[in-house]
Amino acid sequence: MTCEQWNEQFRGWLDQDWTNRTDLECPPAVRRHAEGCPRCGPRLQAALLLIQGSPLDRQPPPGLAEQIAARLNTGTSLRPKIRPLWIGIPAAALLFVALGIGLLLPRQGRGANETIVVRFELQAPEARDVAVVGNWNRWDPEAQKLEDPDGDGIWEIEILLKRGEEHQYQFLIDGRNWIPDPEAPLQVEDGFGGFNSVLQI
Amino acid sequence: LTAESHKDKDAQDLWAVQATLNGNSAAFEAIVKRYTPLLYSLAYRLLGQGEEAEDAVQEILEKALRSLPRFRISRRFFPWLYTIGLNHLRSIERRRRRRSRFKIPTAQPERMLESLASEQGDPVRRSELQEGEQLAQEALDTLRVEYREVFVLKAIQGFSVQEVAEVLQMPEGTVKTHLHRARKQMIDFLSRKGWE
């Protein structure tokens, strides 16, 4: 049997409805050819795994549950996240119970135009709308809205920012409450009686 | 799982939730231990990466712990936790898609293949199983997220159609349709693979 002929028979076999048929038997000719064929063998194997389903049920590495339980108790992460370099003074008092995080993600390009994906998170369970407003988006309150897709009260967004520059920003909650990032240690006066958070990357 | 064992598990979950809310921090550990394997398998097959799945499980359980005061004790805990898990995994998937233009690797075949195949002694057979598993994961990755979720929950994790419908908050008929389409698309993928 050639691989082309095999493929036709393979397709014909799989075309039957195998919903609820984890024991679907492979025709002997299809199996025989696949056993000695590096091209067709893995495809038959993949089909059998998908038909049976349960062999693809992956077990976690040993000890993962214990590690997670221990880390939830101490509030640490499995792997340390890379964070931007914060410098300066603690955050001001907040209107909301808020937790802001700037998280650096992989970078694009090199040199003067190098950019970095920065992730912002703000815990604001009572908020209906959250935006990050900064000098990179010309302080436009509509430009970059955070999202809370799973409704857990943590709003998030990822933004591409230039490296080597100082970025100033605040969060705007429900279009009226401006707050600096509570996790950003460096703040400067914003000229309106409040503070901007400063991100240096 | 039988209805009886479901009932037992639900009762144990509710006890652990109540105890956690009452300040017993060890009680949540029981939930972590019970659900880490299920959440890991879900995350692994939806994300296709071991390390990312490990992180995701911790993040899901952290979110569940933070959201616990909002859990209504009259509900079943397991579908509630799974909903949090699926929402979190969808959010990771969305971020991935946004970042894909930066060519961040989203698959680590060498980690993906530390699998059932590793138990096989024959190196040729092992290699075939590994390639088969990798191809199966690729087939899963080609599916729309809705189809992939239904397939992973029903075919891989062994939930009933009713349970899948409860977790994904969709009619049972839709679960069956998604399952059928998922299988059909994966067959198309496998029979086309290498023949385009």
Image (cartoon, coloured by chain):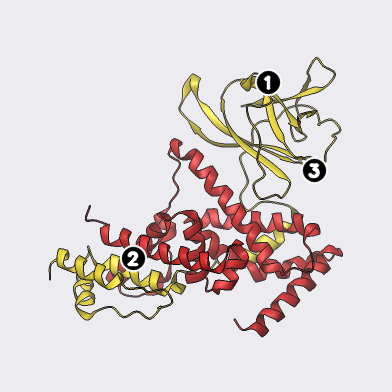
Chain colours: A yellow, B red
Please give left or right for residue A10 compared with residue A116 in the image.
left
Give the residue type that dot 2 points to: Gly
Q: Nearer the viewer, residue A183 or A18?
A: A18
How crowded is the residue under tag 1: few (<14 C-alpha within 10 Å), some, or many (20+)?
A: some
On screen, A180 above or below A28? above
Residue A183 x/y as whole percent: 75, 35
Mark sitting earlier along the chain (3/1): 3
Q: Chain of mark 3?
A: A
Q: Chain of mark 2?
A: B
Q: How many marks?
A: 3
Quadrant (top left, top right, bottom left, bottom right) of the C terminus of chain A: top right
CA distance separating discs 3 and 1: 23 Å
Residue A111 x/y as whole percent: 47, 22
CA distance separating discs 2 and 3: 48 Å
Q: Nearer the viewer, residue A3 or B169?
A: B169
On screen, B2 above or below B84? below
Which disc is residue A126 wearing?
3
Label 1: element kind:
loop
**Label 2 in the same subunit as label 3:** no
On the question of residue B170 being in view, the answer is: yes
Name the outermost residue toward the left.
A1
Residue wearing tag 2: B132
Question: Which residue does the image show at 36% across and 60% down from the upper left?
Answer: B185
Question: Which residue does the image show at 32% across and 58% down from the upper left?
Answer: B189
Label 3: element kind:
loop
CA distance separating discs 1 and 2: 52 Å
Residue wearing tag 1: A139
Quadrant (top left, top right, bottom left, bottom right) of the N terminus of chain A: bottom left
Label 2: element kind:
helix
